């Protein structure tokens, strides 16, 4: 259609939802790519390394209608999954060995009797690494984020430098560094003066000039300006206080899995980070560090297989600058980042108002469902745009019919038919004419009151209008039968509901000895596995 003609016909806007032809032409019904939801009865998938943003309100069903499909349907992409409470690991663990995937579980509090693997996210930082200095600096920045305040920022910057120099000294002395080893070193400063004197001596004799300078500065400030020394040290203590927990320290010593195993390895690995939900904020520093380390490793191996970083409850991570960097720079490096927030307010509070624009502008997929707040609903309504609504203005049409009838009756009573003919034709046409008006494709209140099985998806780069898609709980879909175990937070835990040809049925879940062919898989280190009756491992 010619552009001018199009504008004349849709003078108030041409917003619309995608239809089946649009979706089929965009390749969203292919078998490749990560699932996004459903269109009618077909699974929507997108094969892209672009970032994905999902805004789903509390109770919106993101686990049952989206995350479960990503994790339980066959998918051999290496993944790192932020899995608060461990429910995603619980429902999907049995599907991994069938795909020859090694499953690892950072599970400091041993949730749901799932495996426990200790991981040192800094194990690739060694003395012979060409990235030693840069990596230490990145770790220090992740560990001690800047608050933005004028005076406090000075102490935070000095705390970063001191922490970086101390970690670098650990690498010199031990050949590696871990967060627990840095924690123990920091505790010596005021807890064991003699041991700290030995650490300081090692730093003063370091091969690295910045470590020598920092050691000299620490010694001088401790003796001459103890108040300033205490303020800087207080920043370090404040940002490593999460390591007071011995379970957490044990989980960070390493030895069971290396984050480098997600990148460039022939064997596919999937790692679940499983902090209890109430600890996400407290442990946010180490979680940010783990994601940042994988991003760094993948950026150095852009030709390696794509890696999926699935960040559930991203809003609980606080000032997660790594997410903004990932959305902005990860595309092309083979790193797929999928972040889940409850509303755009979480992004604004943690990263600033401009971050909302950056997330929306950088994401290939922007997905909304279960919206509970007006601010997010209004944003989605504005993104959908305006349509030209064509409707029957019944009052205007009735007036036109009345005028046409009057002209006809006037002729019957002797009026000149030639004088009234044009008026009669005009009003008859007016009586049939439909009116046009501007209207949002969906208003904010309509978005907030969408059906629970509906969602709105925007996809960039496909010449595709927004999609009014469906979302269905995994236990109602035949294609998901046998691909999920019970959710520990939604009893019963000894059986699962499976959708049959016509009706749903309940199948018992049994604990069995791990089959011989899977005995070396780390997810089965305990020697037992769960199996759904009728679906053999």
Image: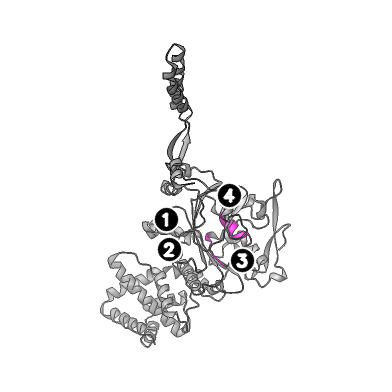
- Mark 1 sits on what residue? 346
Residue 513 in picture, x, y percent from top left: 71, 66
Q: CA distance from mark 4 to mark 1?
A: 36 Å
Marking on residue 21: 4
Label 2 vs 1, first from the N-terminus:
2
- Local packing at callout 4 (Cα closer than 10 Å; few below 14, some 14-19, many 20+) is few
Residue 84 in picture, x, y percent from top left: 52, 60
| Residue at the image point whose x is 47% and y is 47% from the top | 2
Does the stretch in magenta take in 74? yes
Compared across the picture, whether 125 is left or right of 96 comes to left
- Mark 2 sits on what residue? 324
Q: CA distance from mark 3 to mark 4?
A: 29 Å
The residues colored magenta run: 66-84
Does the stretch in magenta take in 132? no
Give the label, 4 or 1, closer to the camera. 4
Q: Helix, strand or loop at disc 2?
A: helix
Give the label, 1 or 3, closer to the camera. 3
- Mark 3 sits on what residue? 76
Residue 519 in picture, x, y percent from top left: 68, 71
Q: Helix, strand or loop at disc 4?
A: helix
Q: CA distance from mark 2 to mark 1?
A: 13 Å
Callout 4 touching callout 1 (CB < 8 Å): no
Marking on residue 211: none
Q: For this rendering, which residue is in front, 239 or 32?
A: 32
Label 3 vs 2, first from the N-terminus:
3
- Local packing at callout 1 (Cα closer than 10 Å; few below 14, some 14-19, many 20+) is some
Residue 393 in picture, x, y percent from top left: 45, 30
Label 4 vs 2, first from the N-terminus:
4
Q: Which residue is most to the right? A: 534
Label 3 vs 4, first from the N-terminus:
4
């Amino acid at each position: 259609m010619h552009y001018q003609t199009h504008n004349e016909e849709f003078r108030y806007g041409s917003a619309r939802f995608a239809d089946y032809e649009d979706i089929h032409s965009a390749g969203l019904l292919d078998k490749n790519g990560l699932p996004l939801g459903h269109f009618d009865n077909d699974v929507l998938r997108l094969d892209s390394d672009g970032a994905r943003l999902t805004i789903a309100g509390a109770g919106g069903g993101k686990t049952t209608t989206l995350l479960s499909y990503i994790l339980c349907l066959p998918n051999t992409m290496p993944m790192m999954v932020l899995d608060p409470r461990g429910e995603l690991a619980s429902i999907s663990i049995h599907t991994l060995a069938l795909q020859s995937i090694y499953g690892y579980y950072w599970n400091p509090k041993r949730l749901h009797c799932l495996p426990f693997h200790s991981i040192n996210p800094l194990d690739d930082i060694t003395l012979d690494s060409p990235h030693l200095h840069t990596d230490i600096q990145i770790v220090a920045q992740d560990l001690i984020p800047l608050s933005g305040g004028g005076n406090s920022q000075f102490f935070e910057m000095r705390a970063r430098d001191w922490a970086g120099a101390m970690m670098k000294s650990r690498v010199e002395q031990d050949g590696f560094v871990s967060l627990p080893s840095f924690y123990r070193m920091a505790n010596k400063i005021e807890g064991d003066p003699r041991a700290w004197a030995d650490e300081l001596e090692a730093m003063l004799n370091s091969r690295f000039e910045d470590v020598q300078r920092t050691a000299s500065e620490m010694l001088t400030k401790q003796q001459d300006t103890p108040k300033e020394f205490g303020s800087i040290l207080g920043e370090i203590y404040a940002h490593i206080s999460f390591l007071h927990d011995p379970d957490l320290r044990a989980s960070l010593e390493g030895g069971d899995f290396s984050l480098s195993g997600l990148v460039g390895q022939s064997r596919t690995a999937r790692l679940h980070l499983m902090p209890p939900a109430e600890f996400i904020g407290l442990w946010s520093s180490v979680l940010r560090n783990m994601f940042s380390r994988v991003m760094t490793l993948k950026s150095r191996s852009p030709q390696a297989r794509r890696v999926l970083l699935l960040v559930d409850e991203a809003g609980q991570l606080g000032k997660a600058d790594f997410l903004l960097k990932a959305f902005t720079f990860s595309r092309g490096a083979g790193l797929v980042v999928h972040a889940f927030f409850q509303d755009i307010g979480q992004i604004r509070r943690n990263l600033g108002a401009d971050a909302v624009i950056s997330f929306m502008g950088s994401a290939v997929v922007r997905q909304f469902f279960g919206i509970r707040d007006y601010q997010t609903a209004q944003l989605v309504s504005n993104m959908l745009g305006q349509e030209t609504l064509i409707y029957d203005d019944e009052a205007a049409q009735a007036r036109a019919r009345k005028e046409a009838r009057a002209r006809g009756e006037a002729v019957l009573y002797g009026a000149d038919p030639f004088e009234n003919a044009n008026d009669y034709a005009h009003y008859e046409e007016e009586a049939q004419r439909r009116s046009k008006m501007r209207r949002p494709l969906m208003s904010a209140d309509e978005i907030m009151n969408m059906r629970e099985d509906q969602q709105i998806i925007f996809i960039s780069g496909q010449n595709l209008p927004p999609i009014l898609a469906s979302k269905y709980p995994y236990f109602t879909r035949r294609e998901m039968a046998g691909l999920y175990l019970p959710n520990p937070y939604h009893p019963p835990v000894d059986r699962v509901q499976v959708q049959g040809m016509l009706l749903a049925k309940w199948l018992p879940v049994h604990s069995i000895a791990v089959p011989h062919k899977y005995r070396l898989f780390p997810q089965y280190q305990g020697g037992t596995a769960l199996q759904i009756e009728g679906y053999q491992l």
